[in-house]
Image (cartoon, rainbow, N blue to C red):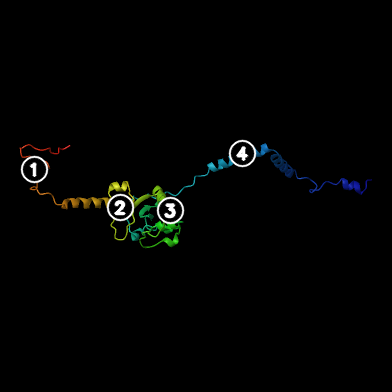
Amino acid sequence: MSGPETVASSAPPTMDDQPSSSGSLLYDIVYEIVSSPVNLALVGIISFLLYKISKSRQPPATLPPPPPELPRLRRDFTVAELKHYDGTQPDGRVLTAVNGNVYDVTKGKAFYGPGGTYAVFGGRDASRGLATFQITSSISDEYDDLSDLNSHEMESMREWEMQFKEKYYLVGRLLRPGEKPTNYSDEDEDTPTDSSEVRKRTATQTAEGSTSSGAADAPSSSPHEKEPSVDSKAPGDGAASADGTESDKPKAE
């Protein structure tokens, strides 16, 4: 007859004593993948392919339609008129003046329109702010002739103006107080001219007009006035001699 030890040894094993076959299988699979670089590379390639396949099956995101292109604007502005083009009006056009020239910066509305980084320049003269790098304190409701800027600040402003010329098209000029706007023709709309060239052209036309009017007012010579005759010349100046022969006269070259 067997003792208590024999009975204990013949008892069936409990659930805690049985190893988990599923856990051991998962562990073996993960160990095989991690321990081999080739397996890691294969897992990465398979994951990438599965991602591309799932991405291609997704419908493309619909982008909002671009805003309609505004008609070309060509005219001059006073400071008060320019203020109405800050991007808050119904058409959303944004204009900015630099060094006496007005540019259409509507395509840069994210910067110069409402809520943009440089929204303070929308509908304003940005010359002083760009020259001094002071944005908020450089805005004025009056015309600024920039006469107090030094050479370094003027050079900085001109560099900014060159960038505006490359990115945005020229609309017209920023008028001084009392200055009359220019009537632009259809050819001028296709080939816009900056304020310096317009002022040079105006000055040239004015000078030509004053010259032609001065020439018209100059007294013309009377048809009765003639050159002095030979008889009135002094002796020795080519007058006829007493024997009737002529002395040497200057000939036309």
Q: Residues under labels 4 and 2: Cα distance?
A: 68 Å
What SS does tag 4 mark?
helix
Q: Residues under labels 4 and 3: Cα distance?
A: 54 Å
Front-lying residue, 250 or 142: 250
Which residue position is annotated with label 1? 230
Q: Amino acid at mark 1?
A: Val
- Left or right: 113 in relation to 211: right
Q: Amino acid at mark 4?
A: Ile
Quick check: can you spot residue 230?
Answer: yes
* First reached walking from the N terminus: tag 1 or tag 3: 3
Q: Residues under labels 1 and 2: Cα distance?
A: 55 Å
Which residue position is annotated with label 4? 45
What SS does tag 1 mark?
helix
Which residue position is annotated with label 2? 199
Query: In the rendered image, which quarter is residue 148 located in?
Result: bottom left
Which residue position is annotated with label 3? 156
What SS does tag 3 mark?
helix
Numbered disc total: 4
* First reached walking from the N terminus: tag 1 or tag 2: 2
Front-lying residue, 14 or 202: 202
Residue 60, image x, y percentages: 49, 45
Q: Nearer the viewer, mark 4 or mark 1?
A: 1
Q: Amino acid at mark 2?
A: Arg
